[in-house]
Image (cartoon, rainbow, N blue to C red):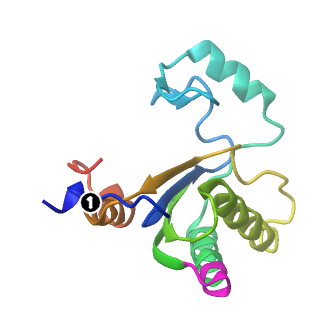
Amino acid sequence: MADVEFNLGEPLAYFITWTTYGTWLPGDERGWNRKGVGEIQLPNAALEKAASKEMSEIEFVMSDQHRELVAETVRRHCSIRGWHLHVVNPRTNHVHVVVTAPGYDPKTVRGQFQAWCTRKLKTVVSNRKHFWTEGGSGRFVNTVDDLERVIVYASEAQDRKHHDIA
């Protein structure tokens, strides 16, 4: 029963996710997150329409080239920082990273990834201002079982139609 272990110091890793600009708006039919509220918010078509009108440019959907550039940038940043990268998986509308970054909080880690990825993406998409939505998710991974689960989810489950890992 390995899942009972708990790390009272640094977490084993962070499971970090962020979305691309305009692809998951407040009110989205898939549910959405409100800043400072833990629960997933219900769909709201009127709110989604209003949020869409507030966008300053069209949504950013990553091509294969963009996805590889993001993956390589995250790998390189982890190498420079001495962080242990378990997995990076850029999708067309979001990015998953599972990383061990001792001494850093997940928001800072995500911010560094986003900043460096933006710099690199601007070399191929120079006319864009926004690549990412505000915020994202940074879950603490405290057990070996949870680490294995998030690695599988971030690297494989996204590609399965009916996955049983959450």
Residue found at the far left of this picture = 1
Left or right for 20, reference 149: right
Q: Which residue position holds label 1?
A: 5
Q: Residue at x 85, y 53 (%)?
A: 129
User: Percent x, y for residue 157?
Assistant: 30, 58
In this view, the residue in front, 129 or 8, is 8
Q: Is residue 74 above or below residue 49?
A: below
- Name the kind of residue labelled 1 in the image: Glu
Left or right for 133, reference 55: left
Q: Secondary structure at mark 1?
A: loop
The residue carrying pointer 1 sits among few (fewer than 14), some (14 to 19) or many (20 or more) residues within 10 Å by Cα, namely few
Left or right for 112, reference 15: right
User: Percent x, y for residue 107?
Assistant: 65, 54
In this view, the residue in front, 7 or 13, is 7
User: Percent x, y for residue 92?
Assistant: 54, 57
Q: Residue at x 38, y 61 (%)?
A: 7
Note whether residue 134 is visible: yes
Q: Residue at x 62, y 71 (%)?
A: 70
Q: Residue at x 66, y 81 (%)?
A: 81
For residue 14: magenta?
no
Number of callouts in the render? 1
Q: Is residue 21 above or below residue 36?
A: below
Determine the main secondary structure of the stretch shown in magenta: helix
Quarter of the image for residue 160 reads bottom left
Note whether residue 92 is visible: no
User: Percent x, y for residue 29?
Assistant: 48, 25
Q: Which residues are magenta?
A: 77-83
Q: Is residue 10 above or below residue 49?
A: below
Q: Is residue 60 above or below residue 91?
A: above
For residue 82: magenta?
yes
